[in-house]
Image (spheres, coloured by chain):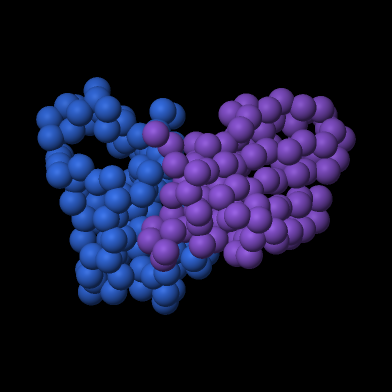
Amino acid sequence: TQLLEQSPQFLSIQEGENLTVYCNSSSVFSSLQWYRQEPGEGPVLLVTVVTGGEVKKLKRLTFQFGDARKDSSLHITAAQPGDTGLYLCAGVQAGTALIFGKGTTLSVSS
Amino acid sequence: DSGVTQTPKHLITATGQRVTLRCSPRSGDLSVYWYQQSLDQGLQFLIQYYNGEERAKGNILERFSAQQFPDLHSELNLSSLELGDSALYFCASNPSGGAFYEQYFGPGTRLTVT
């Protein structure tokens, strides 16, 4: 059983569209991180959210941590081909190592 | 470039064999993490070392072992390899060893077991 469920698994959209990907769990996390991974490379951290209800913005990306700290979402406005990649959420429980979801593969075509 | 290096980039070997993957963390980082990424399981934490000592263990098989040397580089040893061990293996590093803090990932080693 995957501790962190990400949806959708795959997303293929046109440039300029908006999208939201979700990261859900039945467990509480002390913090949650979002990474982006491109083919042939390791994941790169985008953001860390810590407080329930927290919203963070990174240019066209908006990250939200659920009030109960069990879920998170990533919203991309006006997607661009450069946003293509695998988006991974990762939870931290009581200082232990990161627990990753399986990811959402995003493809943005021009 | 994250500053984390991994060698080799690709490795092809046969079932039953043993291989060693090497990781050099970013300069100044004391903690090294090893992960396995496969299509069906995603990115799975294997083991963490901090300043030469094992700090945390995840889903690491008994056939796998790791160590961190005094110069802080780390090696992951995989033995009695099975087809199912084919995967991408990543190492990551950070300065403090706390999972909360950003981990910097290397480019990975792609292992193919035939």
Residue pictured at 81% horizontal, 50% vertical: A60
Q: Is residue A38 visible?
A: no
**Which of B111/B64 is in front?**
B64
Residue B1: percent from left, percent from top: 55, 58
Left or right position of A5 against B92: right
In the image, is A25 to the left or to the right of B26?
right
Residue B75 appears in the figure: yes
Figure check: A79 above or below B101? above
Q: Name above or below for residue B93 compared with residue B34.
A: below
Residue A88 drawn at (x, y percent): 56, 44
Residue B9 in percent (x, y) is at 38, 43
Q: Residue at x 43, y 37 (%)?
A: A2
| Front one among B16 and B60 | B60
Residue A27 in the image: above or below residue B29: above
Q: Quadrant of the C terminus of chain B?
A: top left
Q: In which image quadrant can residue A18 be found?
A: top right
The chain that appears blue in the image is B
Image quadrant assignment for residue A32: bottom right
The colour of chain A is purple
Kindly identify the residue that appears in the image at 74 percent across and 59 percent down.
A55
Residue at point 44% right, 55% down?
A98
Q: Horizontal and vertical percent for residue A50?
A: 60, 64
